[in-house]
Image (cartoon, rainbow, N blue to C red):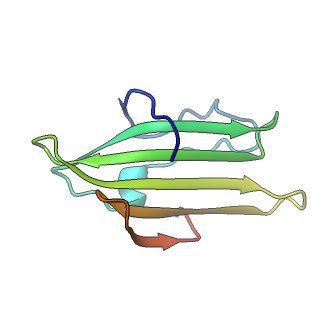
Amino acid sequence: MGQRMPPKMVYTLSSGVSTSLNETHNFEAIFRIAATNHLMLVRFRSQGCPAVAVDWEHDEYTSDGRLVARYQSFERLCPSGERQNGWRKFDRTGQLVSETDNLC
């Protein structure tokens, strides 16, 4: 998964991230994070100007700080204007648990 940056609490993305992919996402709701757990942004990357691809990595922790799961999500804007997005959930050992082709 590459080098990780220090985690930060994340609830939604700023609408200023890009002009073409500027929707905010509530990742806790998308990933169905338990109310007692919290989600940390580990990595964010956008490609293009304006952005045509955005990738996120999040870690989920319990209230006592134990790693529960890792998430990789993406959003792409195709040349046709169609949006593609999805996410994958991995357990703490790195095994794929679930995936979807839609962030919503």
32 or 67: nearer the viewer: 67
Give the answer, above or below, for where 65 lies relative to 88. above
**Residue 23 falls left or right of residue 12:** right
Q: Residue at x 50, y 35 (%)?
A: 3
Q: Quadrant of residue 51?
A: top right
Q: Quadrant of residue 94?
A: bottom left
**Coordinates of residue 56 in the picture (x, y in percent):** 53, 45
81 or 93: nearer the viewer: 93
**Coordinates of residue 88 in the picture (x, y in percent):** 48, 64
**Residue 54 falls left or right of residue 24:** right
Give the answer, above or below, for where 82 lies relative to 98. above
- Outermost residue toward the left in this view: 64
**Residue 12 falls left or right of residue 14:** left
Give the answer, above or below, for where 102 lies relative to 12. below
> Total marks drawn?
0
Give the answer, above or below, for where 18 lies relative to 27. above
Q: Residue at x 68, y 38 (%)?
A: 46
Q: Residue at x 48, y 71 (%)?
A: 99
**Coordinates of residue 41 in the picture (x, y in percent):** 42, 38
- Outermost residue toward the top in this view: 6
Q: Quadrant of residue 39?
A: top left
